[in-house]
Image: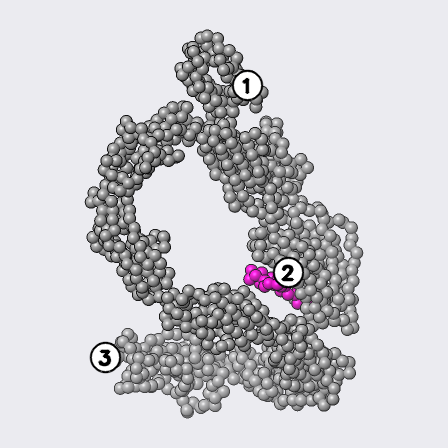
Amino acid sequence: MEVYWTSFPAPHARLRLLRSPRKKEVSLLLRDCALPTSSAPSSQLRTGLFFFGSLFGANLDRVPEGLNLGMEHLVWLLCFGSLALSYTSGGDVCVSGHDSGPVFEGQPSNVLFPEGLTEEPVTFTCQARASPAATYRWKVNGTEVPLGAESRYTLVAGNLLIDSPQRGRDAGSYQCLATNRCGTVLSQPANLKFGYVHPFPPDPRSPQTAYEGTGSTLNCQPPSHYPVLSYRWFFNEFPIFVKPDGGRWFISQVTGNLHLAKAELKDTGDYYCFTTNHMDLHTKNVFSRANQLTVLPHANPRRSAPKIKVRFPSETYALAGQTARLECFAYGNPVPILRWRKVDSSLPPKVVPSADTPTLTIPNLGFEDEGAYECEARNSEGQDSYQGRIIVQARPEWTRVMRSSEVEISSEMHWSCAVAGKPKPSIHWLRNGLPLRTQDRIEVNDGQLRISHLTLEDSGMYQCVAENKHGTIYSNAQLKVQVHAPDFRLSPVRRLIPAARGGRAVMECRPRAAPKPTLFWSRGTELLTNSSRVMVTPEGNLWITNISRTDEGKYTCFAENYLGKANSTGVLSVRDATKITLAPSNADINQGENVTLQCHASHDPSMDLTFTWSLNGVSLDPEKSVGHYRRLEAKETIGDLLIVNGQLRHAGIYSCTAQTVVDSTSASAQLVVRGPPGPPGGVVIKDVNETVVELGWSQGYDNHSPIGKYIVKGRSALAPGWKQMRTDPPTIEGNAESAYVIGLLPWMDYKFQVIASNILGSGEPSTASAAVRTRQAAPSVAPSGLGGGGGDRNELIITWTPMSREYQNGDGFGYVLAFRKRGAPMWLVERVPGADSSRFIYNNQSLSLYCPFQVKIKAYNSQGEGPFSQTAVVHSAEEEPTDAPRRINATALTAFDIMVSWEPVEHVTANGAVQGYEIRYWRQQDRKEAADRVRTAGLEPIARVSGLRAVTLYYVAVLAYNSAGTGPSSPQTFVTTKKPPPNRPPGNVSWRTDGSWVTVIWDHVKALKNESAVLGYKILYKHEGHHALKVLEKNKRSFSLPLPKDDSYVVLEICAWGEGGNGPPQETIVSRDSVTFSTPGTGMMVQNSAGRLCLCHALLPAVSVLLLLIGLGEL
């Protein structure tokens, strides 16, 4: 804005103001501001004109030199300023302290809308807090959104509604602008995108063939869509979806393709790719035409090493905080086993659940997850691997944001904002929603904004905007440029300023004023100037040092700027100084001891005295009910500190401060706490070989007691806990700073820590060393668990227990097998790669059945081979037994158990060895093919079959079995189970005592028609704390036993028994306890409970056969 002086017609003046931003000329006729003449121009008036020009960015340099004005014209300038202020604000001014610019409380977010869903509107949210209330408008792709009665766009309280949305005309980036008289802010952008998935083409798909044992891929070829789809496949008919089936099948969620690792004949059929489009309001499914797969049989399916067919990208870019997924799948026969690893590091625990599946899932991605990942596929025929990198990027995120500011006019404002993100975000600035660039008084430099010589027009809403390809963020702040006369109402000079004699007084003068006022002080009528004891700081504060009683009195601060004057007065009152009369003394204690630090002081009696303590400059709180510090209660002038159970951390400089409202004084003392040494520092690896690591460290703080010795602790990946390690020398002296750790495992990762000790105990461990891996060495032990056998005809299967990581000693690990027919001179040698391998199949068409082989095994790695194991004998595949058991006999033991016996077949033949027998049993109404089966664990020709139904006829047959299968069935026999036992426990259990014996009595249990007769009773008992059980049987309904001699007890279980087995028990507890259920004076307690787990039942398998042989006469 420029201001031109045109003329001064007496007695009035006319000014013409040209506001260049609007390109308008406005004339202000000041009809009521009389201008008296003066003989010379007023410099104060000229300065005032410059000031008013700065209000609005005006150029008032063209004031005529011959203008004859006096001080009276300042009144006219105030009139002009008022009118100009009204003009520049258009009568709508943002009032400081009352109005506030818009602050978003709800901003628009991205919308994914189903294509074709025109009956529903799209809604974008925009809500801002402002005073006065904000008005709203919207932009789409940078263009104003048309609002009106005929428009499809509707504004509802700031929210934008779009009717009948269509992808072609409405998709884009939307932003909300909120405005009031304090300024405008621009919301974050929100994208409107439309989700859709087109149908699959109707064209038929070409059929595919695959040989049995080979891999195959069925392509999905999804139709055009947005966003990404999820994929499933169904087989022949919906909804029979394809399952992983032990890792044979895999559906890529990247391409949608269906991959088959090893085809089987049952896989022949039609396959349909089934896709799902997921949106918030809508889900749509479409599926393809049939993909016909025919699996051709192969007489001897070829075994093949893994071949990775599905590979994740060599570089995968992923956002921090999101989930990354890598896909890997391999063909092979047998079906390969997949393993994931992070190259040069270990997989984080959060990915363990997916570490052996075709998809590696890394949730909540962080920058520590960045790096190379490897997928390895392995089977008995070999291995294949593939590597790729994950590169983690991040959306912009503020590390420093703007803050709203109120700044005085003509001063300088500086804002800065800082942002993190990957790729590095760019930064630009907005003022009231419009771009801000370097020009004139404005300097924009990336995240820095500087505006000099502030004017009222600089007030408004400012935004720092950071963006990269992953997003845009906004930091908002309001700038208020202040202009007003000095005012002490909000921050007057303190009415009473107490100060200590000999001390220092500080009187602050902080009026509210803009521009910055001129400040000066007076004492009474005397204007104060700087001297040896009195100083007025540049900020306007008054300092008086070495205070005496003569300094008491009233002090006034005066403030003045072009808009006015103000002053504020306070009274200085001088008091006696505070002094320490008994200072704390240095002290020396052992860890765990108590100590008292004394502190006494004198002070002005008209004021309160308080004591505070600090340790190394950090304040202490002795008033806490828990902790190590206590204040000793005494007179007001005593502030002693008690330290209870002193620890090493309590050592240091203790300062006691005695203070009043006017001054304070302090005294300090040192406390030494002796204790175990501190942690050694800088544990480093000096040298490493296969089993020895040399460590070095620096001596830690001895805590005032010499270090006596060190110990070394270590841990490995196999044993996460710390344990003491063997060292050389075995005892490490306190002056040592290195040692050898011995007895380590080769090719193993270790971390170490060192612990120092002295006569007061062991200290804290050092920080763990960096992880170190010992050098590789050849294996030193042989694999265990060597065995095998079974398999198909012409096969020799050899199995062993895979060696754990601690015995592998190096990479490139595998096994060497040596085997030969028993008595043959030459050994056949095979190498089986892979530490997880546990099985080898030797196939030879000339192998005879059940041929004995001598087998031995050793491990190898990249450094060499280890020792062979002991030789074991393993037989080649055998054939099923050819003979059937004879003379089958089945006998009913109870209602639920039968005993089966038979004449065994020959154990060992030329073609195999019998491992045991299989008993098949089925009810009369069932088919033989559906028979239940139970196998014996050895060669005994008798077995018990349990869990049968009462009073039921069963057919029974027996077959011999070995690793090849079962032999022919024996002739079948039959047996009928017995009636069930009574299902009621004995009732009315009572007891009586006779000296040191107690007799328990019960009622007889009567069997029903459908139950087996009661042949007697079983009494099972055990003493407390003893697991041995004794079984006694009596034909009468009572039983005597000695009383327990102490506080122990006897548990009795009484149940009826007969041919059908044992009935439910009645439990009784007998003890020498307080009389709870007893007659007076007996000192006995009997507790009854029914329906509990029956010890009789638990013993039934062991005693039932014996009980069958016991006659009633014995009962």
Q: Is residue 471 above or below residue 141?
A: below
**Tally of numbered discs:** 3
Instruction: Give the CA separation, mark 1 to mark 3.
Output: 120 Å
Local crowd size for mark 3, using a 10 Å CA cut-off: few (<14), some (14–19), many (≥20): few
Q: Residue under label 1, please give it.
A: 18
Residue kind at label 2, given as amino acid type? Tyr
Judge from the rendering whether residue 740 lies leftward or rightward of residue 839; answer left or right.
left
Where residue 813 appears, as percent x and y from the top left, is 65, 73
Question: Which one is earlier in the sequence, the residue at label 1 or at label 2?
Answer: 1
Residue kind at label 3, given as amino acid type? Gly
Q: 900 or 287, which is in the foreground?
A: 287
Q: Residue furthest front?
A: 532
Read off the magenta span: 336-357
Q: Secondary structure at mark 3?
A: loop
Give yes or no for contact between labels 1 and 2 (Cβ–Cβ under 8 Å): no
Q: 1059 or 663, which is in the foreground?
A: 663
Question: Which one is earlier in the sequence, the residue at label 1 or at label 3?
Answer: 1
Q: Secondary structure at mark 2?
A: strand
Q: Is residue 1088 above or below residue 566?
A: below
* Residue 1043 appears anywhere in the view: yes
Quadrant of res 187: top right
On the rendered image, what quadrant is the N terminus found in?
top right
Q: Is residue 356 magenta?
A: yes
Residue drawn at x 52%, y 18% as measured from the top left:
62
